[in-house]
Amino acid sequence: MAHIGMKYPVAATWTEGNKYADGFVLAKAINFTGTPNKNDADLWADDGIAETDKSVKDMGTSLGVDDLSLENQAKLLGHTYVKAAAGSSGGEGTPESIEIGTEDEAPFFGVGFYKRRKKNGVTSFTVIWLYKVQHSEPTENAETKGDTTNFQTATIEGKAYPVEVNGKMSVGKKLVFNTEAEAKAWLNKQVGIK
């Protein structure tokens, strides 16, 4: 099986009981890395391994997008967002901005996207859904323009925490759909995008 590409990263505010509201598309997808943080414990008894624990504790996430708008950054990180406003009587307006408070706390979000899957000549679409993610402030990067153009894009880091789903603790799930439309529709329903 091979995956080709990635599309449609979405997020929605998470509340207890794995309920989601106020869903939105984050931006256009560039890349995603999910790194499980695992328990690694062995119980030795009678000179041998009696029990092991290799379970997933949580998952570090890194989501690269073409442009993380100030509004979406404020939502993900719990910052104050100010929408741009035109000035009155031809005066200067207010620029769009976010205030990055030192005590701002990032809320939890459900986060998902889909990728194209090809196996034995058959194309399908894999949805990745993380139940409860908390993001952290992205690193700001900038580079002067030289002889060639290098695009500067946004990457936001986070951590997916386990939640109870059907009596088991889980950080997320994968679903495979036959069509792109089905994958997108599932994500829209999950986050409440009409």
Image (cartoon, rainbow, N blue to C red):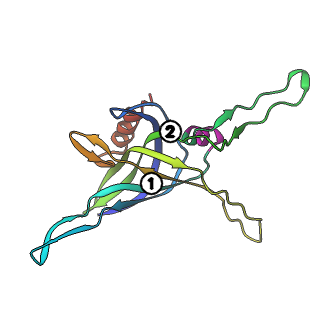
Q: Which residue is mark 2?
A: 107
**Is residue 78 found inside the magenta-colored segment of the image?**
no
**Mark linked to residue 6:** 1
Instruction: Provide residue 82's location: percent of width, then percent of height.
Output: 70, 32
- Which of the marked residues, 1 or 2, is nearer the chain's N terminus? 1
Task: Indicate the position of residue 6 as horizontal and vertical percent values.
Answer: 44, 54
Q: Secondary structure at mark 1?
A: strand
Between 47 and 148, the one nearer to me in the picture: 47
Question: Which residue is at 38% across, 39% downward?
Answer: 187
Q: Is residue 117 above or below residue 131?
A: below
10 Å crowding of disc 2: few (<14), some (14-19), many (20+): some
Amino acid under disc 2: Pro
Q: Secondary structure at mark 2?
A: loop
Specify start and end residues of the magenta stretch as a single range. Answer: 69-75
Which x, y percent locates residue 123? 31, 55
Callout 1 crowding tier (Cα within 10 Å): few <14, some 14–19, many ≥20: some
Occupied quadrant, residue 58? bottom left
Q: Residue furthest right?
A: 90
Q: Which mark is residue 105?
A: none
Q: Does residue 115 lie above or below 10 as drawn?
A: below
Q: Compute the Cα span from label 1 to label 2.
A: 25 Å
Which quadrant of the figure contains the N terminus? bottom left
Task: Indicate left or right for 100 with 9 as reference.
Answer: right
